[in-house]
Amino acid sequence: MSSLLIVNADDFGLCQAVNYGIIESHRNGIVNSTSAMMNMPGIYHAAKLSHEYPSLAVGMHFVLTAGMPFSNIPSLTHNGILGKWLWEIDSNDLPLDEIAQELRRQYEHFITVFGYEPSHIDSHHHVHMMTSIFPIVVNFAQEKGIALRVDRQLAKTWPPIFDPVTSTDYFSRDFYGDEVTESLFLNILNDSITRGDQSIEIMSHPAFIDNALLKSNYTYQRLTELDVLTSTTLKAQVLDRGFKLGSYLDLYDK
């Protein structure tokens, strides 16, 4: 039986260059899943593209470390903007009720903008895997009956209850950085075969480049990811290893 491979492109909606790169990785590559940042400038452009390419499943990329929130979270914002300083706050001091409200607001905005429910939930900078935030997101995913990205390597360091939530057997964040290659991608798959995973998600960040993306600390690496994910040989090698390309929506069929 084929194992499910979900190649998810994070940051849909960040800017037009990211949006077009994700679509290119879907049209001519192996990306069948993406996740959208609801508070970013390119989100309406992303929604338009999603309706032009309905075969691309779109999840929600929960954001607590960039842009403006939809709700009032003064303890997490500086001049109304979210940022990476979230990691500097003691977990006991996080405004969990406000975070839960922000999650709900972003989800509601997703449905308003895209016109359908997200295929799954993940998050920007993996904030949903923080020990105090994770139970909030798990409960929300269970309430909505949708899948959730679970980094089980992180989860080994603390005892969350995530079995009731739909997720992949494994999640890899290793396809990232300055040394992204086709060989790296295939090594991740080889390790998955060795573990015996029936499903795996590989995170990716393909993009073209525009002036907006040049402000990011992760820019030209995205272009390299795009080249790898649209390689003429990669898809054949993925299929030869017995993987079926899909999205989180395919988990509901199991």
Image (cartoon, grey):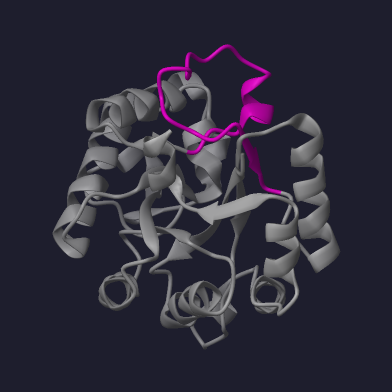
Q: Is residue 161 left or right of residue 234?
A: left
Count of marks, rendered view: 0
Determine whether 176 is above or below 18 in the image.
above
- Most extreme residue toward the front, as rendered? 1
Give percent across and percent down for residue 201.
59, 46
Image point 18% across, 54% down: which residue?
111
Taking the spot 81% from the left edge, 35% from the top edge, the residue there is 194
Q: Position of residue 216 (x, y in %)?
A: 58, 71
Q: How far from the left and from the top, in percent, is residue 113?
A: 19, 63
Which span is picked out in magenta?
A: 149-173
Quarter placement of the C terminus: top left
Question: In x, y percent, where is residue 160?
Answer: 52, 15
> Seen in the image, is 178 located left or right of residue 208?
right
Task: Report the front residue among 158 and 145.
Answer: 145
Does the magenta-highlighted stretch encompass residue 232? no
Place residue 95 in its image quadrant: top left
161 is within the stretch colored magenta: yes
Q: Residue at x 42, y 81 (%)?
A: 16
Q: Residue at x 32, y 34 (%)?
A: 99
In terms of secondary structure, what is the magenta stretch mainly?
Answer: loop
Nearer-the-camera pick, 118 or 64: 118
Confirm whether residue 223 shows in the render: yes
Quadrant that contains the N terminus: top right
User: In this orientation, does residue 64 appear?
Assistant: no
In the displayed structure, would residue 106 be above or below residue 252?
below
Comparing 219 with 230, the one in front is 230
